[in-house]
Amino acid sequence: MICGRRARPTEQPRSSPDGSGGPRRPPRALKKMGLSEDEDVQRMLRGSVLWKIKSRGGFGERLFRLQEDGATVCFEGGSRRARSQQSFSVMHIEAVREGHQSEGLRKYGATFPERHCFTLVFKGKRKNLDLAARGEEDACHWVRGLTKLMKRLQAMSQHEKLDHWIHGVLQRADRNKDNKMSFREVKSMLRMINIDMDDVYAYKLFKECDRSGNERLEGWELEEFCRRLLRRPELEELFGRYSGEDRVLSAEELRDFLRDQGEDASLRRALSIIHAYELNETAKQQDLMMLDGFMMYLLSAAGDILNQEHTKVHQDMNQPLCHYFISSSHNTYLTRNQIGGTSSTEAYVRALMAGCRCVELDCWEGSDGEPIVYHGHTLTSKILFRDVIESIHDYAFKQSPYPVILSLENHCGLEQQATMARHMKAILGDMLLTQPLEGQDPHHLPSPEQLKGKVLVKGKKLPEPWHEPRGGTSLPDPEEEEEEEEEEEEKLQEGRTWQSLQSLQEIKPLPAKDASQVAPELSALVVYCQAVPFPGLAHALHHPRPCEMSSFSERKARKLIKEAGPALVQYHSRQLSRVYPLGLKMNSSNYNPQEMWNAGCQLVALNFQTPGYEMDLNTGRFLANGRCGYVLKPQCLRGLPRDGSHRLVLRIRVITAQQLPKLNQDKGSSIVDPFVRVEIHGAPADCTKQQTHHKLNNGFNPRWEETLSFEVRVPELALLRFVVEDYDSTSYNDFVGQFTLPLASVRQGYRHVHLLSKDGASLSPATLFVHVQCKSL
């Protein structure tokens, strides 16, 4: 087998009497997954004609077929224009939903029986794929088959993923599909996997593996070639350093390695690793570890840079809400920009499934008495408030059990406000918090633990008791007031752009003369997140009101930080606040959330639909604590004194990278010239970055062996970000991949960093191999 496992004796190729190669063998990749005889997978291999329901209505037939790698589905259109082949990876599917369980199918799928329909939800920013089969049986085959493949691929070790990935590449490079590889096809394969290998060396390697001498690699010859290609010299050297000349690692020698890693170095732990990862049964019985087992261990979750204990909820969840950073979304309903983008309930589903705990609803008057959600005064599409609440009901607590906050920006009149309240009560039921918790100290906010499974409404609260039985009281909208001030400053610069946009069509949401008033029915649902204009720091510190919270634009927040940073930290130790992006950013760009977290702000709202380093930092911040959307703030931001000095020196040796993605798939000769940049994001004095030199024409296994050193003064606030880019001397460098995590969640020693794409999807099997050392000062 490949990937460093011992090659079996060479097999003679099977042939049939007619010389055609005999009966078709089951795909090897599926055989390895134990699914080669599975009825559902067999149907997918043969292919099915499915209806693809389009996001704006309409549908077309497409032939969908699973490829022999068991991880790729290809489809092509039935019309002349749509005949170009498209594909997606099963590994990029987040979930398979049966029936009309997506916004697209609920809107446009009524033509097809519900049991014929299913939706593929993808990781990252790729749109859902809504499909309908010709019959219920076909739909079931695809739903069951995809679910099995997803589970098997997800359960694969990194070693198996490498094996699977290289076999997929081999299949694509084998142009005439004869299961044999000429040298020309081998060279094509090398370019596919980002290697620009010298022809002489490549041919030498080819000839060494061509044992039959027929200028073709097949069967185990191909596996031997791939095994040599996938060698990890740096891991072999590391193994040799601890195993000595006999190249076998005893439990005692493994303990030495674990001790140097800063891990549990007990004999019991060493033996458990050997028995979990060693592939050779004879070695395992003698409590020994071979090179392959050692590589399996380092490529597993046990060798990940992220502390695996932090992938579960591990922090104290019994402190007041204001003591946590809370994952928050701005303009949650948007799938693209805030001027002409699409509003969708699926955007709420994606945010909630990404661990977001505070979502925003911009509520406007609907024409038929039903409130709508969209970005007012723009060309964005509209969705029903009721449908948004339905989606929140369905997905609020699938990823995290901790409370969800609905941040209402209300532009509705009293009647439709009452309708909003009715919908929330009817749809959310017991999930909706409508009363203060019994026995809760009114001077302190409740904890995430106390509010598990609850939905909280953030909005304006009428003073109690109010005297208007059916009317409402006019209250200022804190976000609107501040936005008006800022818009006045920016209108001179932005006016022409707005005029040109408004000339495209009339943008006039239905007016609500009483929109500044608050309906008692809606006010009654606001308990712990009462939106008020900011009274000023001096007043707020002398008269703290934990149940009241203010919102700041990024500009106002920066001004407060600059003028009174320590006082703002003190304010945030008692009360919640929300920071949001400037309203006139046409492209829905984000701001750096770190500077807001440094001031203790809990709800740092970002445009989740806009990829970039800002969202990378947000994902990294909430990677710890089981990705539950709540992260306990450091002591210094909770009104507690710092426990002495925590300064440390961080040294990261960037050793190698593996299987970096090819950026330009259409250009065969295009190979990346990668370099690695390591960034620290935290307290202002800690923010810095360093990078390695670039490596020419090698995205497959570049080796740097460069050490980058950082002094970190406030490590409990710091995020560590690894970025790989393709060097370009004449223009901007191209982004390849990144991974961000809290410095407090970093494990020392030799570690693999699993890279993510620009939109946060896995780039498996792409990794960095680094050595991390932290030393207190």
Image (cartoon, rainbow, N blue to C red):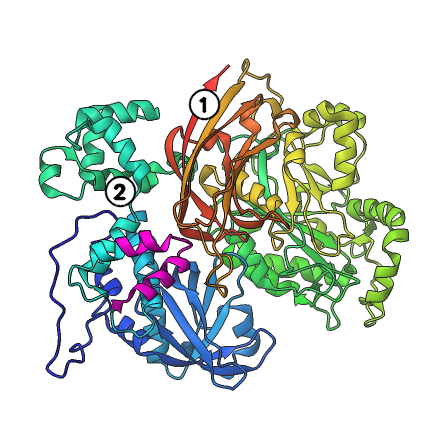
Q: Is residue 189 magenta?
A: yes
Q: Is residue 236 above or below residue 226?
A: above
Tag 2: Cα neighbours inside 10 Å, few (<14), some, or many (≥20)?
Answer: many
Q: Which residue lies most toward the front here?
A: 200
Tag 1: Cα neighbours inside 10 Å, few (<14), some, or many (≥20)?
Answer: some
Viewer-proximal residue, 708 or 776? 708
The label on residue 296 is 2
User: Quarter of the image holding residue 200?
Assistant: bottom left
User: Quarter of the image holding residue 519?
Assistant: bottom right
Q: Is residue 154 left or right of residue 598?
A: left
**Residue 30 locus on image (x, y percent):** 25, 64
Q: Is residue 315 visible?
A: no
Q: Magenta stretch?
A: 180-204
Residue at horizontal 30 percent and vertical 69 percent from the top: 68
| Three-letter code for the amino acid on which mark 1 is drawn | Cys
Q: Is residue 483 left or right of residue 19?
A: right
**Residue 489 locus on image (x, y percent):** 88, 46
User: Quarter of the image holding residue 377?
Assistant: bottom right
Viewer-proximal residue, 366 or 518? 366
Image mark count: 2
Q: Main secondary structure of the magenta part?
A: helix
Residue that label 1 marks: 774
**Residue 644 locus on image (x, y percent):** 54, 13
Determine contact: label 1, label 2, CB under 8 Å. Answer: no
Which badge, 1 or 2, comes first in the chain's sequence? 2
Q: Is residue 678 magenta?
A: no
Residue at horizontal 55 percent and vertical 72 percent from the top: 104
Q: Secondary structure at mark 2?
A: helix
